[in-house]
Amino acid sequence: MQKTEKQKMKLLYLMKLLVEQTDEDHPLTIAQIIDELAKNGIHAERKSIYADINALREYGLDITSRKSKTTGYFIASRTFELPELKLLADAVASSKFITEKKSKQLIQKIESLTSCYEAKQLQRQVYVTGRVKNANEKIYYNVDSIHQAIAQKKQISFRYFEYTVDKEKEYRHGGDLYYASPYALSWDNQNYYLIAYYERYQKISHFRVDKMENIELLDTPACELPEGEFDVVEYSRKLFGMYGGEEELIRLQFDNSLIGVVLDRFGMDADIQKADEHSFIVTFHAFVSPTLLGWIFEFTGKVKVLEPESLKQKLRMKAMECLKMNSDDRTL
């Protein structure tokens, strides 16, 4: 780039310099700014730097000056504060569905939203290596394709797989395409799920997004549900671990020490009533699934199923199966 052309870029270089290399603890003096611009082949005089700083302030950049022995200039506020960036970076690092490679890339982009000095603090805040991560690099494109289909109210086709004990992909239905009308994406237990009307079963179903492949946006309009017939939030709330089953009205009696667990699961609007001085009753609708049974088993000795009777029977059967499976003379 010729010198005259670089001079035209002076204001942009100055903005980049201030954004990337200054914060409250690291201001730059006019002399330092001139030196940094010179490294990029840009000549600048003190008077023009003052004018440029004022222009950037008018543009909306929060440039503050601080006097000590010299006057230093720095970016005082940004779109995201450092504590907010730390939260975002840690959420990305801990997210199970984001691959380790993509986590590192996203964190580097988050770091670019603050100064190079604060970015170092951010990097010390997060640890990606060693965490359980998804291996499907295409999940980001899957999510984008599904969002497009939802926005355009179009059906999608895809292949769906599970892993074998050899850690190999095994496609369901022999690799035949699934056809579905996507309604929403739900986040549950560190995984993304597609909630959709599934053509094969002619009902609402859900699919792990990271186990979907070859997603295609079709020209076929999505099946529309009658107004008010389907509530995504309510549907997700009834699922335990995103497993389906028969929907039942369930009443459980918990020891008072588990009130935090119940509120974490059902929220502050949960239907909770005091049973006695030591326990309370929670009433909710849910799909009776293996994960629901497992959730109840977690609190053995501190929870009692009041209804339905069918849930009590399933718990008894599962308990007997567990005892039989783990008896000394039992082998697989």
Image (spheres, rainbow, N blue to C red):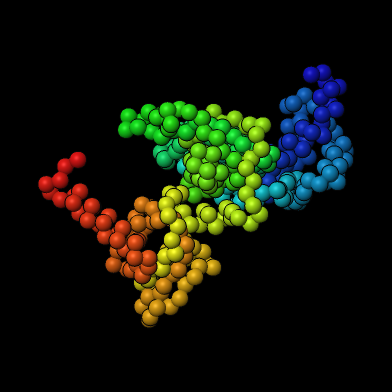
Q: In this view, does 228 lie above or below 224?
A: below
| Residue at position x 78%, y 35% in the image | 14
Nearer-the-camera pick, 50 or 209: 209
Residue 109 horizontal side relative to residue 163, left or right: right
Dividing the image into 4 quarters, which one contains the N terminus?
A: top right
Can you tell which quarter of the image residue 152 is in?
top right
Residue pushed farthest bottom?
Answer: 277
Q: Picture coordinates of residue 292 (x, y %)?
A: 39, 56
| Residue at position x 44%, y 64% in the image | 249
Can you tell which quarter of the image residue 260 is in?
bottom left
Residue 57 horizontal side relative to residue 269, left or right: right
Tell me if residue 102 can be seen.
no
Q: Picture coordinates of residue 177 (x, y %)?
A: 51, 30
Tell me if residue 217 can be seen.
yes
Residue pushed farthest left?
Answer: 329
Nearer-the-camera pick, 257 or 86: 257
| Residue at position x 84%, y 22% in the image | 5
Q: Picture coordinates of residue 311 (x, y %)?
A: 35, 61
Residue 212 horizontal side relative to residue 168, left or right: right
Dividing the image into 4 quarters, which one contains the C terminus?
A: top left
Number of numbered discs: 0
Q: Is residue 180 above or below residue 311?
A: above
| Residue at position x 56%, y 32% in the image | 157
Q: Is residue 126 above or below residue 277?
A: above
Q: Picture coordinates of residue 154 (x, y %)?
A: 65, 37
Can you tell which quarter of the image residue 8 is in?
top right
